[in-house]
Image: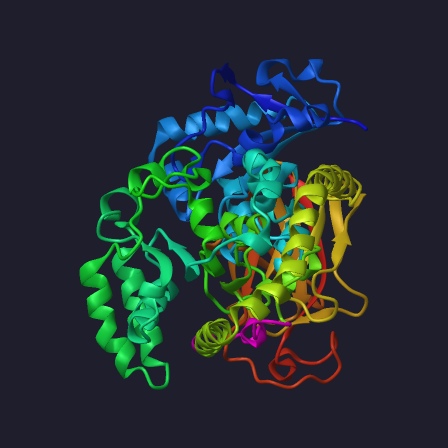
Protein backbone atom coordinates (compact mmCIF):
# COMPACT_ATOMS: atom_id res chain seq x y z
CA UNK A 1 0.00 0.00 0.00
CA UNK A 2 1.49 3.33 -1.07
CA UNK A 3 1.59 6.22 1.35
CA UNK A 4 0.33 9.78 1.09
CA UNK A 5 2.94 12.46 1.67
CA UNK A 6 1.96 15.14 4.20
CA UNK A 7 3.83 18.42 3.65
CA UNK A 8 4.58 20.61 6.66
CA UNK A 9 6.58 23.70 7.59
CA UNK A 10 7.49 23.02 11.21
CA UNK A 11 7.58 20.11 13.60
CA UNK A 12 6.90 20.97 17.22
CA UNK A 13 5.84 19.16 20.36
CA UNK A 14 2.29 19.69 19.16
CA UNK A 15 2.89 17.94 15.86
CA UNK A 16 3.47 18.89 12.24
CA UNK A 17 2.13 22.36 11.49
CA UNK A 18 1.78 24.94 8.74
CA UNK A 19 1.83 28.70 9.06
CA UNK A 20 -1.63 29.34 7.59
CA UNK A 21 -3.54 30.05 10.77
CA UNK A 22 -6.08 32.85 10.87
CA UNK A 23 -8.24 34.28 8.14
CA UNK A 24 -10.66 31.37 8.41
CA UNK A 25 -7.88 28.75 8.51
CA UNK A 26 -6.42 26.83 11.44
CA UNK A 27 -4.69 23.55 12.25
CA UNK A 28 -5.89 20.50 10.35
CA UNK A 29 -7.94 18.10 12.52
CA UNK A 30 -7.44 15.34 9.98
CA UNK A 31 -3.70 15.58 10.56
CA UNK A 32 -4.02 15.96 14.33
CA UNK A 33 -6.37 13.04 14.90
CA UNK A 34 -5.72 10.59 12.05
CA UNK A 35 -2.41 11.25 10.29
CA UNK A 36 -0.39 11.64 13.47
CA UNK A 37 -2.03 8.66 15.19
CA UNK A 38 0.41 5.80 15.54
CA UNK A 39 -2.22 3.27 14.42
CA UNK A 40 -2.23 4.80 10.94
CA UNK A 41 1.41 5.85 10.59
CA UNK A 42 1.92 3.29 7.82
CA UNK A 43 -0.48 5.25 5.59
CA UNK A 44 1.48 8.51 5.56
CA UNK A 45 4.92 10.01 5.34
CA UNK A 46 5.84 13.52 6.48
CA UNK A 47 7.89 15.73 4.21
CA UNK A 48 9.04 19.32 4.68
CA UNK A 49 7.69 21.75 2.10
CA UNK A 50 11.25 22.67 1.09
CA UNK A 51 12.16 19.02 0.40
CA UNK A 52 9.23 17.70 -1.60
CA UNK A 53 11.54 15.96 -4.05
CA UNK A 54 12.60 13.60 -1.25
CA UNK A 55 9.09 12.19 -0.82
CA UNK A 56 8.51 8.62 -1.98
CA UNK A 57 4.72 8.96 -2.11
CA UNK A 58 2.79 9.23 -5.37
CA UNK A 59 0.63 12.00 -3.87
CA UNK A 60 1.71 14.84 -1.56
CA UNK A 61 -0.84 16.91 0.35
CA UNK A 62 -0.41 20.25 2.10
CA UNK A 63 -3.21 20.17 4.72
CA UNK A 64 -4.92 23.44 5.64
CA UNK A 65 -7.65 23.30 8.26
CA UNK A 66 -10.71 25.40 7.41
CA UNK A 67 -13.08 26.82 9.97
CA UNK A 68 -16.74 27.87 9.84
CA UNK A 69 -17.32 30.75 7.37
CA UNK A 70 -13.78 30.33 6.06
CA UNK A 71 -15.04 31.39 2.63
CA UNK A 72 -16.02 34.94 3.57
CA UNK A 73 -13.33 35.35 6.24
CA UNK A 74 -10.41 34.17 4.13
CA UNK A 75 -11.57 36.12 1.07
CA UNK A 76 -11.67 39.32 3.12
CA UNK A 77 -8.24 38.66 4.61
CA UNK A 78 -6.68 37.82 1.25
CA UNK A 79 -8.02 41.09 -0.17
CA UNK A 80 -7.01 43.42 2.64
CA UNK A 81 -4.15 41.76 4.55
CA UNK A 82 -1.01 41.73 2.42
CA UNK A 83 1.03 39.83 5.00
CA UNK A 84 -1.59 37.08 5.15
CA UNK A 85 -1.81 36.98 1.36
CA UNK A 86 1.97 36.64 0.97
CA UNK A 87 2.06 33.85 3.56
CA UNK A 88 -0.71 31.88 1.86
CA UNK A 89 0.55 32.57 -1.66
CA UNK A 90 4.13 31.69 -0.80
CA UNK A 91 3.32 28.43 0.91
CA UNK A 92 0.90 27.24 -1.74
CA UNK A 93 3.21 28.08 -4.61
CA UNK A 94 6.01 26.09 -3.04
CA UNK A 95 3.83 23.06 -3.72
CA UNK A 96 3.78 23.78 -7.45
CA UNK A 97 7.41 22.74 -7.69
CA UNK A 98 6.31 19.10 -7.53
CA UNK A 99 3.66 17.68 -9.91
CA UNK A 100 2.58 15.22 -7.19
CA UNK A 101 1.62 18.01 -4.80
CA UNK A 102 -1.88 19.22 -3.89
CA UNK A 103 -3.38 21.55 -1.32
CA UNK A 104 -5.88 19.88 1.02
CA UNK A 105 -8.63 22.22 2.27
CA UNK A 106 -9.78 20.31 5.33
CA UNK A 107 -13.29 21.20 6.50
CA UNK A 108 -13.73 17.96 8.42
CA UNK A 109 -14.71 19.88 11.57
CA UNK A 110 -17.69 21.74 10.12
CA UNK A 111 -20.80 21.25 8.01
CA UNK A 112 -20.03 21.03 4.30
CA UNK A 113 -22.38 23.71 2.99
CA UNK A 114 -22.70 24.31 -0.74
CA UNK A 115 -21.20 27.77 -0.27
CA UNK A 116 -17.86 26.25 0.71
CA UNK A 117 -17.63 24.10 -2.40
CA UNK A 118 -18.55 27.12 -4.50
CA UNK A 119 -15.76 29.15 -2.87
CA UNK A 120 -12.92 26.80 -3.87
CA UNK A 121 -12.60 28.16 -7.45
CA UNK A 122 -12.72 31.72 -6.09
CA UNK A 123 -9.98 30.88 -3.59
CA UNK A 124 -7.89 29.40 -6.42
CA UNK A 125 -8.21 32.64 -8.38
CA UNK A 126 -7.42 34.83 -5.37
CA UNK A 127 -4.07 33.08 -4.80
CA UNK A 128 -3.51 32.17 -8.48
CA UNK A 129 -3.18 28.49 -7.63
CA UNK A 130 -4.40 25.85 -10.13
CA UNK A 131 -7.85 24.79 -9.00
CA UNK A 132 -7.24 21.23 -10.17
CA UNK A 133 -4.44 21.02 -7.59
CA UNK A 134 -6.90 21.52 -4.73
CA UNK A 135 -8.57 18.74 -2.76
CA UNK A 136 -11.57 19.56 -0.57
CA UNK A 137 -12.33 17.40 2.48
CA UNK A 138 -15.92 17.63 3.76
CA UNK A 139 -17.51 16.22 6.91
CA UNK A 140 -20.30 14.32 5.19
CA UNK A 141 -20.03 11.19 3.10
CA UNK A 142 -22.31 12.87 0.54
CA UNK A 143 -19.82 15.70 -0.11
CA UNK A 144 -18.92 14.27 -3.49
CA UNK A 145 -22.53 14.61 -4.73
CA UNK A 146 -23.45 17.85 -3.01
CA UNK A 147 -22.51 20.11 -5.86
CA UNK A 148 -21.36 20.02 -9.45
CA UNK A 149 -18.71 22.64 -8.65
CA UNK A 150 -15.92 20.11 -8.18
CA UNK A 151 -16.71 18.46 -11.50
CA UNK A 152 -17.17 21.76 -13.30
CA UNK A 153 -13.88 23.27 -12.16
CA UNK A 154 -11.83 20.10 -11.95
CA UNK A 155 -10.91 20.02 -8.27
CA UNK A 156 -11.42 16.95 -6.08
CA UNK A 157 -14.08 16.82 -3.37
CA UNK A 158 -14.14 13.89 -0.94
CA UNK A 159 -16.24 13.39 2.17
CA UNK A 160 -16.58 11.06 5.15
CA UNK A 161 -18.12 11.05 8.60
CA UNK A 162 -14.93 12.31 10.19
CA UNK A 163 -16.31 12.58 13.70
CA UNK A 164 -16.81 8.82 13.60
CA UNK A 165 -13.07 8.54 12.98
CA UNK A 166 -12.15 11.15 15.58
CA UNK A 167 -14.45 9.74 18.28
CA UNK A 168 -13.01 6.26 17.81
CA UNK A 169 -9.43 7.53 18.01
CA UNK A 170 -10.08 9.65 21.11
CA UNK A 171 -12.03 7.01 23.09
CA UNK A 172 -9.72 4.02 23.24
CA UNK A 173 -10.11 3.83 27.02
CA UNK A 174 -13.91 3.79 26.86
CA UNK A 175 -13.82 0.91 24.38
CA UNK A 176 -11.81 -1.22 26.80
CA UNK A 177 -14.32 -0.46 29.58
CA UNK A 178 -17.45 -1.68 27.82
CA UNK A 179 -17.27 -5.08 29.48
CA UNK A 180 -17.20 -3.41 32.91
CA UNK A 181 -20.60 -1.76 32.31
CA UNK A 182 -23.04 -4.39 31.00
CA UNK A 183 -26.08 -2.61 29.61
CA UNK A 184 -28.57 -4.94 31.30
CA UNK A 185 -27.30 -4.09 34.80
CA UNK A 186 -27.09 -0.31 34.49
CA UNK A 187 -29.33 1.63 36.89
CA UNK A 188 -30.81 4.48 34.88
CA UNK A 189 -32.24 7.28 37.02
CA UNK A 190 -32.99 9.77 34.21
CA UNK A 191 -35.04 9.56 31.05
CA UNK A 192 -32.50 11.16 28.75
CA UNK A 193 -29.26 13.02 28.33
CA UNK A 194 -28.98 16.06 26.06
CA UNK A 195 -25.79 18.11 25.78
CA UNK A 196 -26.17 21.56 24.22
CA UNK A 197 -23.05 23.69 24.47
CA UNK A 198 -23.64 26.34 21.82
CA UNK A 199 -26.89 28.18 21.39
CA UNK A 200 -28.65 26.93 18.26
CA UNK A 201 -32.24 27.49 17.25
CA UNK A 202 -33.35 23.87 17.70
CA UNK A 203 -31.55 23.66 21.05
CA UNK A 204 -33.31 26.77 22.33
CA UNK A 205 -36.64 25.32 21.21
CA UNK A 206 -35.84 21.90 22.67
CA UNK A 207 -35.09 23.43 26.07
CA UNK A 208 -38.32 25.42 25.90
CA UNK A 209 -40.32 22.38 24.87
CA UNK A 210 -38.93 20.17 27.63
CA UNK A 211 -39.55 22.94 30.16
CA UNK A 212 -43.14 23.40 28.95
CA UNK A 213 -43.86 19.65 29.11
CA UNK A 214 -42.31 19.19 32.56
CA UNK A 215 -39.53 17.03 31.16
CA UNK A 216 -36.50 19.23 31.75
CA UNK A 217 -35.92 17.96 35.28
CA UNK A 218 -36.34 14.35 34.19
CA UNK A 219 -33.16 14.36 32.13
CA UNK A 220 -29.48 15.28 32.25
CA UNK A 221 -29.63 18.52 30.30
CA UNK A 222 -26.93 21.10 29.59
CA UNK A 223 -27.59 24.32 27.76
CA UNK A 224 -24.83 26.79 26.99
CA UNK A 225 -25.43 30.43 26.39
CA UNK A 226 -25.09 33.19 28.90
CA UNK A 227 -22.02 31.78 30.65
CA UNK A 228 -20.49 30.72 27.34
CA UNK A 229 -21.18 33.91 25.39
CA UNK A 230 -17.78 35.53 25.67
CA UNK A 231 -15.95 32.27 24.98
CA UNK A 232 -18.00 30.45 22.42
CA UNK A 233 -21.32 32.00 21.60
CA UNK A 234 -21.10 35.75 21.12
CA UNK A 235 -21.12 35.82 17.32
CA UNK A 236 -24.12 33.51 16.89
CA UNK A 237 -26.16 33.79 20.06
CA UNK A 238 -28.73 36.45 19.14
CA UNK A 239 -29.08 35.23 15.56
CA UNK A 240 -29.88 31.74 16.78
CA UNK A 241 -32.35 33.00 19.38
CA UNK A 242 -34.12 35.00 16.67
CA UNK A 243 -34.17 31.91 14.46
CA UNK A 244 -35.67 29.91 17.34
CA UNK A 245 -38.42 32.49 17.77
CA UNK A 246 -39.15 32.36 14.04
CA UNK A 247 -39.29 28.57 14.07
CA UNK A 248 -41.53 28.62 17.17
CA UNK A 249 -44.03 30.81 15.33
CA UNK A 250 -44.45 28.05 12.75
CA UNK A 251 -45.32 25.38 15.31
CA UNK A 252 -48.86 24.43 16.26
CA UNK A 253 -49.97 24.57 19.90
CA UNK A 254 -46.94 26.66 20.80
CA UNK A 255 -48.35 28.84 23.58
CA UNK A 256 -46.64 26.94 26.37
CA UNK A 257 -43.37 26.92 24.40
CA UNK A 258 -43.56 30.71 24.00
CA UNK A 259 -44.00 31.09 27.74
CA UNK A 260 -41.03 28.86 28.57
CA UNK A 261 -38.63 30.51 26.10
CA UNK A 262 -38.08 33.50 28.34
CA UNK A 263 -37.59 31.26 31.36
CA UNK A 264 -34.95 29.21 29.58
CA UNK A 265 -33.02 32.22 28.27
CA UNK A 266 -33.08 33.95 31.65
CA UNK A 267 -31.92 30.92 33.61
CA UNK A 268 -29.30 29.34 31.42
CA UNK A 269 -27.19 27.27 31.87
CA UNK A 270 -29.89 24.92 33.04
CA UNK A 271 -29.86 21.75 35.16
CA UNK A 272 -26.51 20.29 34.09
CA UNK A 273 -23.89 23.00 34.05
CA UNK A 274 -20.95 22.91 31.64
CA UNK A 275 -17.39 24.08 32.16
CA UNK A 276 -17.36 26.23 29.03
CA UNK A 277 -13.68 27.07 29.16
CA UNK A 278 -12.80 23.37 29.22
CA UNK A 279 -15.34 22.63 26.50
CA UNK A 280 -13.77 25.25 24.24
CA UNK A 281 -10.17 24.23 24.87
CA UNK A 282 -8.08 21.96 22.68
CA UNK A 283 -9.87 18.64 22.15
CA UNK A 284 -12.52 19.97 24.50
CA UNK A 285 -15.44 18.17 22.89
CA UNK A 286 -13.70 14.85 23.55
CA UNK A 287 -12.89 15.81 27.13
CA UNK A 288 -14.87 13.54 29.45
CA UNK A 289 -14.84 16.07 32.32
CA UNK A 290 -16.12 19.29 30.81
CA UNK A 291 -19.14 19.28 33.13
CA UNK A 292 -18.84 21.58 36.13
CA UNK A 293 -19.87 18.67 38.35
CA UNK A 294 -16.48 17.11 37.73
CA UNK A 295 -18.06 13.80 36.76
CA UNK A 296 -17.32 12.09 33.47
CA UNK A 297 -19.87 12.69 30.75
CA UNK A 298 -20.03 8.96 30.10
CA UNK A 299 -21.52 8.44 33.58
CA UNK A 300 -24.46 10.64 32.57
CA UNK A 301 -24.93 8.66 29.38
CA UNK A 302 -25.01 5.42 31.33
CA UNK A 303 -27.54 6.91 33.73
CA UNK A 304 -29.95 7.76 30.88
CA UNK A 305 -32.52 5.68 28.98
CA UNK A 306 -31.89 7.53 25.70
CA UNK A 307 -30.06 10.53 24.25
CA UNK A 308 -31.60 13.59 22.60
CA UNK A 309 -28.81 14.57 20.25
CA UNK A 310 -28.91 18.12 18.90
CA UNK A 311 -26.39 18.22 16.09
CA UNK A 312 -24.97 21.47 14.74
CA UNK A 313 -27.41 22.08 11.89
CA UNK A 314 -31.15 21.61 11.68
CA UNK A 315 -31.85 22.61 8.11
CA UNK A 316 -33.60 21.19 5.07
CA UNK A 317 -30.73 19.58 3.18
CA UNK A 318 -29.85 15.90 3.47
CA UNK A 319 -26.30 16.72 2.33
CA UNK A 320 -24.94 19.51 4.52
CA UNK A 321 -25.52 18.26 8.06
CA UNK A 322 -23.11 16.90 10.64
CA UNK A 323 -22.99 13.69 12.62
CA UNK A 324 -20.63 14.56 15.46
CA UNK A 325 -19.11 13.04 18.56
CA UNK A 326 -22.50 13.32 20.30
CA UNK A 327 -24.00 10.69 18.01
CA UNK A 328 -20.99 8.39 17.97
CA UNK A 329 -20.51 8.67 21.72
CA UNK A 330 -24.08 7.46 22.21
CA UNK A 331 -23.33 4.51 19.90
CA UNK A 332 -20.12 3.69 21.78
CA UNK A 333 -21.84 3.83 25.18
CA UNK A 334 -24.88 1.82 24.08
CA UNK A 335 -27.49 4.57 24.47
CA UNK A 336 -30.49 4.82 22.05
CA UNK A 337 -30.93 8.20 20.39
CA UNK A 338 -33.30 10.71 18.87
CA UNK A 339 -31.27 12.92 16.55
CA UNK A 340 -32.18 16.54 15.76
CA UNK A 341 -30.20 17.21 12.61
CA UNK A 342 -30.84 17.42 8.88
CA UNK A 343 -33.37 15.10 7.23
CA UNK A 344 -32.24 11.53 6.66
CA UNK A 345 -29.48 11.68 9.26
CA UNK A 346 -30.65 8.34 10.70
CA UNK A 347 -30.71 6.96 7.17
CA UNK A 348 -27.09 8.07 6.81
CA UNK A 349 -26.20 6.16 9.99
CA UNK A 350 -27.86 3.04 8.64
CA UNK A 351 -26.04 3.40 5.34
CA UNK A 352 -22.73 3.58 7.22
CA UNK A 353 -23.38 0.27 8.97
CA UNK A 354 -25.28 1.02 12.18
CA UNK A 355 -28.75 0.12 13.37
CA UNK A 356 -31.20 2.71 14.63
CA UNK A 357 -34.03 2.08 17.09
CA UNK A 358 -37.11 2.24 14.89
CA UNK A 359 -38.49 -0.90 16.55
CA UNK A 360 -38.62 1.01 19.85
CA UNK A 361 -38.63 4.73 18.96
CA UNK A 362 -40.80 6.39 16.33
CA UNK A 363 -38.22 7.60 13.78
CA UNK A 364 -40.56 8.95 11.12
CA UNK A 365 -39.31 12.47 11.90
CA UNK A 366 -36.08 11.61 10.06
CA UNK A 367 -37.73 11.71 6.63
CA UNK A 368 -39.38 15.14 7.06
CA UNK A 369 -37.63 17.99 5.26
CA UNK A 370 -39.59 20.87 6.79
CA UNK A 371 -37.68 21.95 9.96
CA UNK A 372 -40.82 22.89 11.92
CA UNK A 373 -42.62 19.66 11.05
CA UNK A 374 -39.51 17.58 11.70
CA UNK A 375 -39.06 19.29 15.07
CA UNK A 376 -42.70 18.67 16.03
CA UNK A 377 -42.46 15.01 15.00
CA UNK A 378 -39.24 14.57 17.01
CA UNK A 379 -40.90 16.08 20.08
CA UNK A 380 -43.75 13.58 19.69
CA UNK A 381 -41.16 10.80 19.58
CA UNK A 382 -39.61 12.08 22.80
CA UNK A 383 -42.97 12.10 24.61
CA UNK A 384 -43.94 8.69 23.28
CA UNK A 385 -40.58 7.21 24.33
CA UNK A 386 -40.88 8.68 27.83
CA UNK A 387 -44.40 7.26 28.13
CA UNK A 388 -43.19 3.85 26.95
CA UNK A 389 -40.42 3.80 29.58
CA UNK A 390 -42.81 4.98 32.29
CA UNK A 391 -45.15 2.14 31.39
CA UNK A 392 -42.58 -0.67 31.34
CA UNK A 393 -38.93 0.26 31.66
CA UNK A 394 -37.75 -3.37 31.65
CA UNK A 395 -39.48 -4.12 28.36
CA UNK A 396 -37.88 -1.02 26.85
CA UNK A 397 -34.41 -1.99 28.10
CA UNK A 398 -34.74 -5.56 26.85
CA UNK A 399 -35.74 -4.25 23.42
CA UNK A 400 -32.85 -1.81 23.01
CA UNK A 401 -29.97 -3.89 24.42
CA UNK A 402 -29.41 -6.21 21.40
CA UNK A 403 -29.32 -3.23 19.02
CA UNK A 404 -27.00 -1.27 21.31
CA UNK A 405 -24.59 -4.18 21.67
CA UNK A 406 -24.39 -4.79 17.93
CA UNK A 407 -23.71 -1.08 17.36
CA UNK A 408 -20.96 -1.05 19.97
CA UNK A 409 -19.28 -4.03 18.35
CA UNK A 410 -19.49 -2.46 14.90
CA UNK A 411 -18.08 0.87 16.10
CA UNK A 412 -15.10 -0.78 17.81
CA UNK A 413 -14.27 -3.23 15.03
CA UNK A 414 -15.15 -1.45 11.80
CA UNK A 415 -13.99 2.16 12.18
CA UNK A 416 -10.24 1.44 11.82
CA UNK A 417 -10.91 -0.23 8.47
CA UNK A 418 -13.21 2.65 7.47
CA UNK A 419 -10.31 5.05 8.05
CA UNK A 420 -8.01 2.97 5.89
CA UNK A 421 -10.66 2.65 3.18
CA UNK A 422 -11.11 6.42 3.19
CA UNK A 423 -7.38 7.02 2.66
CA UNK A 424 -7.50 4.66 -0.33
CA UNK A 425 -10.60 6.44 -1.66
CA UNK A 426 -8.82 9.79 -1.28
CA UNK A 427 -5.86 8.56 -3.33
CA UNK A 428 -8.14 7.01 -5.93
CA UNK A 429 -10.20 10.16 -6.44
CA UNK A 430 -7.09 12.32 -6.81
CA UNK A 431 -5.65 9.93 -9.38
CA UNK A 432 -8.93 9.85 -11.30
CA UNK A 433 -8.99 13.64 -11.37
CA UNK A 434 -5.47 13.64 -12.78
CA UNK A 435 -6.62 11.61 -15.78
CA UNK A 436 -9.86 13.55 -16.33
CA UNK A 437 -8.11 15.88 -18.77
CA UNK A 438 -8.38 19.25 -17.03
CA UNK A 439 -4.64 19.73 -17.15
CA UNK A 440 -3.97 18.08 -20.51
CA UNK A 441 -5.65 20.72 -22.71
CA UNK A 442 -7.43 24.02 -22.57
CA UNK A 443 -11.15 23.50 -22.81
CA UNK A 444 -14.48 25.17 -22.32
CA UNK A 445 -17.42 24.17 -20.18
CA UNK A 446 -20.93 25.63 -20.15
CA UNK A 447 -22.68 26.17 -16.84
CA UNK A 448 -26.18 27.37 -17.62
CA UNK A 449 -25.16 29.42 -20.63
CA UNK A 450 -25.63 27.04 -23.54
CA UNK A 451 -28.53 24.76 -24.34
CA UNK A 452 -27.87 21.09 -24.88
CA UNK A 453 -25.66 19.02 -22.61
CA UNK A 454 -24.88 21.46 -19.83
CA UNK A 455 -21.79 20.50 -17.93
CA UNK A 456 -20.19 18.94 -21.00
CA UNK A 457 -16.48 19.60 -21.39
CA UNK A 458 -15.69 20.89 -24.87
CA UNK A 459 -12.00 20.23 -25.61
CA UNK A 460 -9.88 22.53 -27.75
CA UNK A 461 -7.64 21.74 -30.67
CA UNK A 462 -4.53 23.75 -31.47
CA UNK A 463 -4.52 25.11 -35.02
CA UNK A 464 -2.83 28.09 -36.67
CA UNK A 465 -1.68 29.60 -33.37
CA UNK A 466 -5.07 29.32 -31.64
CA UNK A 467 -6.84 26.89 -29.40
CA UNK A 468 -10.16 26.46 -31.17
CA UNK A 469 -13.46 25.30 -29.69
CA UNK A 470 -16.19 23.76 -31.75
CA UNK A 471 -18.95 24.97 -29.47
CA UNK A 472 -21.58 22.72 -31.03
CA UNK A 473 -22.69 21.15 -34.27
CA UNK A 474 -25.21 23.55 -35.74
CA UNK A 475 -24.76 26.04 -32.94
CA UNK A 476 -26.13 26.31 -29.41
CA UNK A 477 -28.47 28.90 -28.06
CA UNK A 478 -27.78 31.21 -25.15
CA UNK A 479 -31.26 32.06 -23.90
CA UNK A 480 -30.55 33.06 -20.33
CA UNK A 481 -27.67 34.30 -18.26
CA UNK A 482 -24.93 31.70 -17.98
CA UNK A 483 -21.23 31.16 -17.47
CA UNK A 484 -18.52 29.71 -19.68
CA UNK A 485 -15.50 28.35 -17.84
CA UNK A 486 -12.32 28.50 -19.94
CA UNK A 487 -9.41 26.41 -18.67
CA UNK A 488 -6.07 28.02 -19.36
CA UNK A 489 -2.73 28.45 -17.62
CA UNK A 490 -2.20 31.61 -15.62
CA UNK A 491 -1.62 34.65 -17.78
CA UNK A 492 -3.37 37.01 -20.21
CA UNK A 493 -5.42 35.42 -22.98
CA UNK A 494 -7.37 36.68 -25.95
CA UNK A 495 -10.75 35.02 -26.39
CA UNK A 496 -12.83 35.31 -29.55
CA UNK A 497 -16.43 34.12 -29.73
CA UNK A 498 -18.45 33.94 -32.92
CA UNK A 499 -22.19 34.37 -32.52
CA UNK A 500 -25.07 34.82 -34.95
CA UNK A 501 -25.07 38.00 -37.03
CA UNK A 502 -26.53 41.06 -35.31
CA UNK A 503 -25.66 44.70 -34.63
CA UNK A 504 -23.23 45.06 -31.71
CA UNK A 505 -25.76 47.06 -29.71
CA UNK A 506 -27.93 43.93 -29.60
CA UNK A 507 -25.08 41.68 -28.44
CA UNK A 508 -25.05 40.22 -24.92
CA UNK A 509 -23.35 41.88 -21.98
CA UNK A 510 -20.14 40.12 -20.98
CA UNK A 511 -18.48 39.77 -17.56
CA UNK A 512 -14.92 38.43 -17.28
CA UNK A 513 -14.21 36.97 -13.85
CA UNK A 514 -17.36 38.75 -12.58
CA UNK A 515 -16.26 42.17 -13.89
CA UNK A 516 -18.18 43.78 -16.74
CA UNK A 517 -16.09 43.94 -19.89
CA UNK A 518 -16.70 45.81 -23.14
CA UNK A 519 -15.34 43.62 -25.95
CA UNK A 520 -14.23 44.57 -29.44
CA UNK A 521 -16.88 43.82 -32.07
CA UNK A 522 -16.37 43.12 -35.75
CA UNK A 523 -18.81 41.82 -38.34
CA UNK A 524 -18.00 38.99 -40.74
CA UNK A 525 -20.20 37.98 -43.62
CA UNK A 526 -22.55 35.96 -41.48
CA UNK A 527 -21.33 36.25 -37.88
CA UNK A 528 -20.59 38.80 -35.20
CA UNK A 529 -17.08 38.41 -33.81
CA UNK A 530 -16.69 39.27 -30.11
CA UNK A 531 -13.12 39.63 -28.86
CA UNK A 532 -11.77 40.45 -25.41
CA UNK A 533 -8.80 39.88 -23.13
CA UNK A 534 -8.99 37.92 -19.91
CA UNK A 535 -6.59 37.01 -17.14
CA UNK A 536 -6.55 33.36 -16.16
CA UNK A 537 -5.89 32.78 -12.48
CA UNK A 538 -6.18 29.48 -10.68
CA UNK A 539 -6.08 27.65 -14.01
CA UNK A 540 -9.20 29.20 -15.53
CA UNK A 541 -11.24 32.30 -16.19
CA UNK A 542 -15.00 32.73 -16.48
CA UNK A 543 -17.16 34.52 -19.01
CA UNK A 544 -20.66 35.39 -17.85
CA UNK A 545 -23.06 36.12 -20.68
CA UNK A 546 -26.20 38.15 -20.05
CA UNK A 547 -28.57 38.33 -23.06
CA UNK A 548 -30.36 41.57 -23.86
CA UNK A 549 -33.98 41.59 -22.77
CA UNK A 550 -35.03 43.29 -26.03
CA UNK A 551 -34.80 40.04 -27.94
CA UNK A 552 -38.13 38.55 -29.00
CA UNK A 553 -38.70 34.96 -27.80
CA UNK A 554 -39.14 32.26 -30.42
CA UNK A 555 -36.78 30.07 -32.44
CA UNK A 556 -36.97 29.27 -36.16
CA UNK A 557 -33.97 27.73 -37.87
CA UNK A 558 -30.95 28.08 -35.53
CA UNK A 559 -27.97 29.64 -37.23
CA UNK A 560 -29.89 30.96 -40.23
CA UNK A 561 -32.83 32.91 -38.81
CA UNK A 562 -32.74 36.68 -38.62
CA UNK A 563 -31.54 37.83 -35.18
CA UNK A 564 -34.69 39.85 -34.51
CA UNK A 565 -36.87 36.73 -34.48
CA UNK A 566 -34.30 34.35 -33.07
CA UNK A 567 -34.88 35.14 -29.41
CA UNK A 568 -31.46 33.76 -28.48
CA UNK A 569 -27.79 33.86 -29.43
CA UNK A 570 -26.27 31.05 -31.47
CA UNK A 571 -22.65 30.30 -30.57
CA UNK A 572 -20.66 28.56 -33.26
CA UNK A 573 -17.06 28.58 -32.17
CA UNK A 574 -14.46 30.14 -29.95
CA UNK A 575 -10.76 30.84 -30.38
CA UNK A 576 -8.19 31.29 -27.63
CA UNK A 577 -4.59 32.41 -27.76
CA UNK A 578 -2.06 33.52 -25.20
CA UNK A 579 -0.81 37.09 -25.40
Residue 509 location in percent, x, y?
Answer: 51, 64
260 lies left or right of 417: left
| Residue at x-position 74% and y-position 77% | 558
Magenta highlight range: 359-372
| In this picture, residue 74 sits left or right of residue 121 | left
Quarter of the rendering occupied by the C terminus: top right
Q: Is 363 a magenta residue?
A: yes
Quick check: 535 above or below 326?
Answer: above
Q: As displayed, is residue 226 above or below residue 524? A: above
Image location (x, y in percent) of residue 303: 45, 54
Q: Is residue 523 visible?
A: no
Point out the residue furthest to the left here: 266
Indicate left or right for 221 with 317 as reference: left
Q: Quadrant of the N terminus?
A: top right
Q: Is residue 416 visible?
A: yes
Residue 373 covered by magenta stretch: no
Residue at image position (63%, 84%) is 565
* In the image, residue 566 above or below residue 235: below
Residue 407: x and y in percent read 66, 53
Q: Is residue 178 above or below residue 566?
A: above
Question: Residue shown at 26%/53% (left/top)?
Answer: 225
Residue sitting nearer the eye, 386 or 20: 386
Place of residue 262 in the rendered image (x, y in percent of width and height, measured from the top left) = 20, 69
Which residue occupies the foreground of this view, 178 or 381? 178
Q: 292 or 36: nearer the eye?
A: 292
Q: How many marks?
A: 0
Q: How was this image coloured? A: rainbow
Amino acid sequence: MSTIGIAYEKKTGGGHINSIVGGGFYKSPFVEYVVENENYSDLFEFIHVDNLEEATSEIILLPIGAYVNFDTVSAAELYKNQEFFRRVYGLLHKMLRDPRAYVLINLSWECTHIQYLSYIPKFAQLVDFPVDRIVFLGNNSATTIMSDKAQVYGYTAVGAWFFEFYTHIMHQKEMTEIGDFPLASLQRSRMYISLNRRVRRHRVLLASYLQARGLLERGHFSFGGKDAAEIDNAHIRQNEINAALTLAMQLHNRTDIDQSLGHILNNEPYVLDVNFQAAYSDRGIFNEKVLSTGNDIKNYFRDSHFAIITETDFGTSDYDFLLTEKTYKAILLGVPFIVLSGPYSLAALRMSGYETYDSVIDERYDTIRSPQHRFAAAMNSIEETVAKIDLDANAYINAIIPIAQRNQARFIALVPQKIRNFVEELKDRIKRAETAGYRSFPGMLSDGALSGDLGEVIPARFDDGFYQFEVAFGGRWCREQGVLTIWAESGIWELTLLINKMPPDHAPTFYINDRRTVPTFSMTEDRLEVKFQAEARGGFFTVKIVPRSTFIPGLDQPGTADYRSLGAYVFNMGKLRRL
